[in-house]
Image (spheres, rainbow, N blue to C red):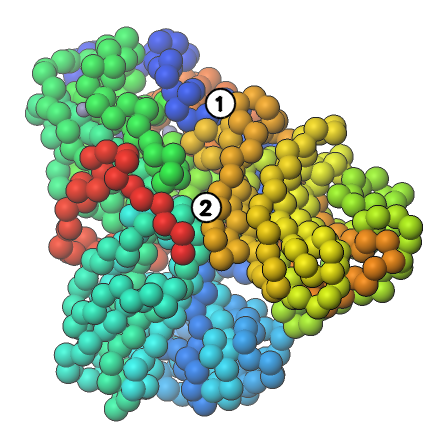
Amino acid sequence: MNTTWQSGLEYIQELDNGTLQMPTGSPPSEVRYSDSDSLNGNNTGSLETETRDSQILAEPGDDDAPVTPLTPAKRGHWFPKQAYSKLYFSFETNQPGPISYIIHLEIEQDQDSYPRYLTLSLDGEPFAENIWIDEDGYHTSTGTPVIYGVGEHTITITINYGAHAEKGWLLKHFWVYDLDGNPLDVTGQFTHKEGHCNLRYLVEMGPDTTLNLAIENGWETHTRICDIYVDDTFITSRTVPANLEIDLGDYIDSSVHELRLDIYWQGYTECGKKITILQVHHRGAFIELDYRSDHKPDDAFISYFESYYKCYSYHRVDIRVDESLAFSDTLHPPEISALHDNHFQHKKQYTQQAGNIDWLWCLFAHYIWESGGYYGGDSIVFPDQAWKDWCFWNWRDISSARRTVLMHEFGHYLGMPHYYDNTDCPCPDCCYAHRLDCIDSDPTYCVWHWQRGAYYESIWHDVCNSTSGWTRKGPGSGFEGYRTLQDSGTLHTKKDYLYCTQIAGTSSWKHGPLFVKELHTSVEIQDIRSLQAKMQLIDGNTMGDVIITLFDTNKERSIVFCLYDSWYGSVSRSYFDYSKAGDEHDNWYEGEHYGNFTATWLFGCNPESITFLTSELDDGTPKTHTHYSGNEFNPERKIKYIGIQFARARYYNYHGHLGRVLDLVIRYHFDRPGISPLVCAANDESDTVNMQSSPLSETDWKLHPSIDSDYFSSSSPFSLHIRSIMTLPQVSKWSHVNSNQNIQRTMH
Ligand SMILES: [Zn+2]
Ligand SMILES: [Zn+2]
Ligand SMILES: [Zn+2]
Ligand SMILES: [Zn+2]
């Protein structure tokens, strides 16, 4: 059988006796619904841009570390406070062997202050012993001993001595790969031996956060209690083994929190219980699905689709099957547009407070003017009958076709393009691969595609425990200081904060040095999800300012956080300032402080409407503030540097180590939800016309060896998890979403 895209279409055409026409060129322009711009921002740019390319350079692939969207370590997973501190993970080999697999680990030193020894074991037998780990952590791939056959094995990661400090060491990444870099299925994590077995994870949360947790018996079979905490606040107590779906509550969108599982009476044996599902997710998007009465979507498709996003990202996508529509034969753009206007109940609905939650409309039609599928603005159109025909002739299952095509179209909404030169993605399980490959498998997004979607986020993080990389910028540097720039002053670190001493006294009122780091890539203000800065002032009868600034590509100030100390510890204040290019700035002044205080600043653009700048300050009494809105600031202004300025007042004593910067995090992503219409799975000519882009050439692609092409042969590493999460009892998902006002914003 001829198995190309095109031949499939020919079958459909033959079957339908010419009903299904395949025009070349772009579809009529009416298909771009007029409201889509206001809903999804004004990103009409091309699908392949220079910045997207730079983004890849700044991501985990950078240092040749194999990347997966999520690992069992989540954003971080602390080793238990025990003399022999152990974490156990099980994985499944997929080749008869004999073969040595690769364990990739990222471990960071957290609260422990001494170097330790690390040991890796396979099924209880050490194979890498007494590896010295210190403040530089451990970021290495290690080969396992040769393994025979297909089956489950356990890796133990041991740090001795790990009982010195709570949260001494943090696991940031764990995965197992074969020699080609294909990820294997990590099947679970075993508990360690401890009376109250504490497992602490850093996870991303947001509005309506849910935990899917499945715990099975390991080496012991008693029913036990499992208490669940978020940021040390008790949430619920359950008995395990169990397969649970737990409501964790509402949090600021994409904020990071500590999830703690406390499993009782695990002191009798190692590996007493086995965690097989641990997924945390919050609202990402909703899809209202209307269908022609004889094309109602099946439950297996919906379950797979929804489970996929829960497993692969911290964002959940919920399908709400809505209306059954009257018969129609082949729909053309004007008819689709009319159906959209008349039947999309949630048009333009999203929730400001809750972050980036959009409603999309999906229509299951009979045939449409192009055969494969359509995405544009807030709409997805799926020609169900065309795919039923295709499945009939190709011996495929319609449910598989639905999940593949809907993931493909929804991926466009997240900002994912087709592959280079509009070809099929070379990863066979990717829903952008050739249809005959991916429809047979459990469709996924390959890493190449994940990195181009809005749910994939880049993070710049400085934990402020080292002065290296901070470069002094003096008066002649071109940087626009918040206070008068001067060259004197020395930057120091005291384990977990930065401070400055020896600023020369001068007659200038506030003056001092600026230390700058250049970001991996310049980022438009609208692409910055958040800048978070943690700063501290200890009362010491001293005075002066500590200032964090983001600078644009012209070295002009934009966002400024300032801890301001007015007079020998009497009164301190905090400022947030946004300086436009030029001189104008907004000067938000926040209340008075006496004595010591720690300020956690958060700045961000509103993700729904990139015309707002908001900031938050939590210094014991949380406050939020809206800065420029409307067209008062330029959302495309490019940020390139972050700086810390320390400023002394004339000859008065400066704070020295009492004025501190503890932590700096910038979170950004380049792919705002797309709005460009894409007609998919059609012939190449019309697709190319609709791409509105100049895809990168093969040469550009070769510049990024860290995401090498071997990666594309990967199977879907999460497939088992997806199947098991699908069996979960579904809570009533819709109880929270009847009105936007129901969503509470909670500070934690
Ligand atoms: Zn979110
Ligand atoms: Zn509807
Ligand atoms: Zn792909
Ligand atoms: Zn497409």
Disc 2 on helix, strand or loop? Answer: loop
Left or right: 11 in relation to 501: left
Mark 1 and mark 2: Cα distance apart in space: 20 Å
Disc 1 on helix, strand or loop? Answer: loop
x, y percentage for residue 60?
A: 54, 55
Residue 435 lies, with reference to residue 677, above or below; the image says below
Ligand 1 sits in which quadrant?
Answer: top left
Q: Nearer the viewer, residue 683 or 580?
A: 580
Which of disc 2 and disc 1 is earlier in sequence? 1
- For disc 2, the marked residue is 456
Residue 35 lies, with reference to residue 724, above or below; the image says above
Left or right: 133 in relation to 620: right
Residue 696 lies, with reference to residue 255, above or below; the image says above
Residue at figure coordinates x 40%, y 46% from the top left:
253
Q: The N terminus is located in which quarter?
A: top left
- For disc 1, the marked residue is 42
